[in-house]
Image (cartoon, rainbow, N blue to C red):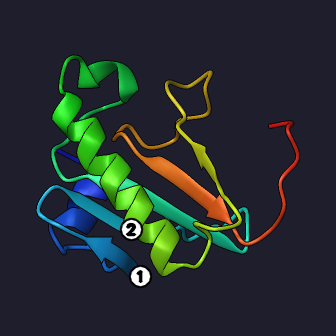
Amino acid sequence: MDCIFCKIIAGEIPCDKVYEDEKVLCFNDIAPKAPIHVLAVPKKHTANLLEVGDDKEMLNDINYAIKKVAEKMNIAENGFKTVINTGTDGGQSVNHLHFHILGGKKFGEDL
């Protein structure tokens, strides 16, 4: 498999780790779109949100990791934006499910 996120999870490619547990790895994005831009990635390779299917545990694990990142990065109180891109029309550039956690500034309601 030639998945860059799987290689990061395996330690083959370094990352600036923010949070990690048995199921999820969170690291700073290399091309940030906000002062704080962290990616939350499940360690189990899953191409996109639609492939999660009925795996509610995976979504719960990611949600918990996002909460931990928000607390650690001091953006939990004032808020942050979470984005999931799915498929090429949705702007997904890496075919491994990942959640963008964006914070450190005030966002408008527009995308």
Q: Which residue is mark 1?
A: 16
When asked about the image quadrant of residue 23, the answer is bottom left
Residue 3 appears in the picture as rendered: no
* Above-or-below relation of 71 to 82: below
Q: Which residue is mark 2?
A: 68
Q: From the top left corner, tell me how far across and down residue 84 is, in percent.
A: 52, 37
Q: Identify the residue at horizontal 68%, vertical 65% (top origin).
A: 103
Question: Real-space Cα distance between discs 1 and 2?
Answer: 16 Å
Residue 109 horizontal side relative to residue 76, left or right: right
**Depth check: 102 or 44 in front?**
102
Q: From the top left corner, tell me how far across and down residue 17 is, in percent.
A: 36, 79
Q: Identify the residue at horizontal 73%, vertical 66% (top origin).
A: 34
Disc nearer the start of the sequence (1/2): 1
* Above-or-below relation of 43 to 70: above
Furthest toward the front, the residue is 77
**Depth check: 41 or 7 in front?**
41
**Depth check: 103 or 4 in front?**
103
Q: Mark 1 or mark 2, which is nearer to you?
A: 2
**Would you call the spot at circle 2 few (<14 residues within 10 Å), some (14-19), or many (20 or more)?**
some
Residue 38 horizontal side relative to residue 7, left or right: right
Give amino acid for label 2: Lys
In what element is the residue under mark 1?
Answer: loop
Q: Quadrant of the C terminus?
A: top right
Q: Quadrant of the N terminus?
A: top left
